[in-house]
Image (cartoon, helix red, strand yellow):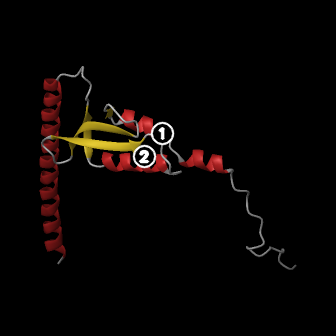
Amino acid sequence: PPPAYQPHKRNAKKPAAPMFDQRQEEARPADRVRSVEEMLEAGQWSELQNRRGTHRKFVRLVMLEGGAEAVKQTFVMASSPSDVRGKHNNMAELRRLDDGVLEALPRNRDVDAGVAAARLRQLHAEYKAFEQETAERRRHFEQKFTVLSSAVG
């Protein structure tokens, strides 16, 4: 008997694509921040007083990787963005500012400067311990590699 007819792959029926909203929801993790305000709150940004009302200015203190001191970061955004992609651009800039941040230190007036300094020292000590452990592991693997490479070649 002749083989069963199978249509060419370009003529085959494709399954219907999900609606745009469904694809977006499936691709987006549930815990992902969805607004600039949520990112500002999660990153412990505090807003400075704005006298003119054209821009909003935010600041925070952060501990960066490899740093021994707290660094002040500043973020400025328009009060009413004229660009359609303004929200997305602001969120992208906040994500870039979060790169390399170990921890954002609280800037509330309730927090004592001594508490923040103690936390900063603790973070620095943890980072130095991590660097030392990493260096020890690197030396260990280099020794193994040397022994194995001399045995092979």
Task: Give the answer, above or below, for where 110 lies relative to 134.
Answer: above
Q: Do the residues labelled 2 and 1 touch (CB within 8 Å)?
A: yes
Q: Secondary structure under badge 2?
A: helix
Q: Nearer the viewer, residue 147 or 119?
A: 119
The residue that disc 1 covers is: 35
Q: Which of 134 and 30 is in front in this view?
A: 30
* Quadrant including the C terminus: bottom left
Give neighbour class at mark 1: few <14, some 14-19, many 20+ (Cα, 10 Å): few
Q: Nearer the viewer, residue 54 or 9?
A: 54
Residue at 14 percent across and 62 percent down: it is: 142
Which residue ends up furthest to the top in the rendered image?
A: 110
Q: What amino acid does circle 2 point to?
A: Met
Please state the horizontal and vertical placement of residue 3, each as a whole percent of the image: 83, 77
**Left or right of residue 148: residue 97:** right
* Quadrant including the N terminus: bottom right
The residue that disc 2 covers is: 91
Which residue ends up furthest to the front in the rendered image?
A: 52
Residue at 43 percent across and 35 percent down: it is: 38
Please state the horizontal and vertical placement of residue 34, each as a whole percent of the image: 49, 40
